[in-house]
Each structure stands twice: as C-alpha cells, then as structure tokens.
Image (spheres, rainbow, N blue to C red):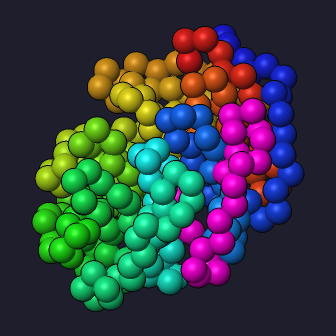
Amino acid sequence: MQQLSETAWTLELEQADKLSVDRRGNIFVSDQNGYLRQFSEQGDSLNIYAPAFSAPLSQLDAFWTVSIFLFSASQQQIEILDRFLNPINRSTMADLGITGYISHASQGNNHGLWLYDETDLRLKKIDLSSGNLVQQQPLMALLPHSSLEILQIQERKNLLFLQIATEGIYLFDNQANFIKKIPIPGEVPAFIDQEFIYYLEGDYLLKTNFLSDVSTQLRLPDLPEIKALALTTNKVILLDTHILRAFNRPEAF
C-alpha cells in the first residue's frame, strides 16, 4: 500500500478556510474573512486579494484556471477574478434576479451558473450573462430521504457533482438530469479531477474512478483534522485550520 512521504513544505495560515488549485499548479486559500492568497506549487507566496465583502467564502473554485470563482452565501454575492486576482465580474443574487436564498453556487461552462436555492430546495442553472433560468431540479422530490446538507456543487466536463455530507456525491448531466450516486463518507469536500474523485476516509486518501467505481487508497501520516484537500500534478495538498501542507504525490496516484 502506498503512503504519503514526508511533508514537502508547510505554511502557517491564520483562520484558513477554503482551498482550491488551478491546472497550472497554483494553490489558492481563503480565510474566514474571505481574503484570498495564491501560492505556487513550491509554497511561494504569489498574490493576495481582499474581496469587496468581509465574509467567509461558501465556494472557492480555481479549476477553470483563466478565472477564479468566489461565492459568499452570507452576502449573496459572486465574484469572478482573472488569473492575476483582478475582479472581472461582481454580482449579487438580486442583480441576477434571484429572489430566494442561495446557499451554494458554482461556475459552469458557456456562462452557466449553478445554484442551490434553499427557499424551494431546488438545484438551478441560470445564464450568468442574462440571468435567465435554464434548468432546475427539485432535490427533495429526487432525494426524499436525504438531509440535503450540501457541502459543494461543482461542474466538471459538462457533469455536475453535488456532494451531501456523509452521503456522497450525486452526479448530474449538464441538463440537471440525475445519473448516479457515489457513496462518500465524512464532511470534507471531495476533490474532482478528470474521471477521479479524491476523498478522505479515516486515515486514508481514496481515489475512485466514478466511471468504473474502481478505487485505490493512500495511507496518510498522523495529522490534525483536515478540512480541505486538493491535488496538483506533483503535490497532495491538505489544509487544517492553521496549516497548509504539501506532500509529494506518489506516481500513479
């Protein structure tokens, strides 16, 4: 069984909260005031951004590389930054004509914006440029026994991944049609890349192919409670409330 090697580097961060990486290996960490810091894959500090609102981020997603998506549920506001952390779009839900309470939001392809509206318990997709409702799915009807304690929603390769605490990831197509469920324990947001889902289970980091359901696992060293994880080409990144840790990523994992 593979095991993570010694830590490649660590950084002490106050009130660390959300974690994301882009496809160039850049690492992004927000704190509980919404401030965003960018680091290289080697742990060098590259940039910092202070958002228009001083509030925790509900969603931080740098997957698109050319843009970084921020959402604050408490402010009901999204921001989209370019790769240099310059704001290029800032909108409230009211600006977009959304009247409910949005607890989760995620950027999609072709100006799409996925939303979870707690007012009517619906998963919705709107056109960000026009605000028009494109798709919606009543989750209570689809998942009648679910807690609907949503951890994250993310679009990857025209698929939508909706993760619910202790239940797993529910997979939808880009028309909000349900495809399958991937059981995942715990309350740490999974990391999704290509056809793989990476998630924590006990003292292990698991890698599951959501097409074949084949899994491999990596034993973790003794660590404080992890609140976020991500993987770059060369590193496994783990975040707790005070420390960002990078480990060399084993081959074939």
- Quadrant including the C terminus: top right
- Reply above or below: 36 against 214: below
Of 221 and 125, which appears nearest the observer? 125
Of 117 and 97, which appears nearest the observer? 97
At a point 20% along the width and 59% down the height, the residue shown is 142
- Quadrant including the N terminus: top right
Q: Position of residue 229 (x, y in %)?
A: 62, 42
Of 104 and 235, which appears nearest the observer? 235
Q: Position of residue 122 (x, y in %)?
A: 25, 71
Q: Is residue 74 left or right of residue 105?
A: right
Q: Position of residue 22 (x, y in %)?
A: 52, 41
**In the picture, residue 90 is in which quadrant?**
bottom left
Q: Is residue 238 left or right of residue 200?
A: right
At a point 46% along the width and 21% down the height, the residue shown is 215
Q: Position of residue 26 (x, y in %)?
A: 61, 41
At a point 54% along the width and 34% down the height, the residue shown is 24
- Reply above or below: 252 against 73: above
- Reply above or below: 49 against 44: below
Q: Is residue 196 left or right of residue 175?
A: right
- Reply above or below: 211 against 186: above
Residue 241 at least partly seen: yes
In magenta stretch: residue 82: no
**Is the stretch drawn in magenta largely helix, strand or loop?**
loop
At a point 23% along the width and 47% down the height, the residue shown is 172
In the image, the segment drawn in magenta is 38-60
In magenta stretch: residue 43: yes
Residue 187 at least partly seen: no
Count how many numbered circles sit on residues in the image: 0
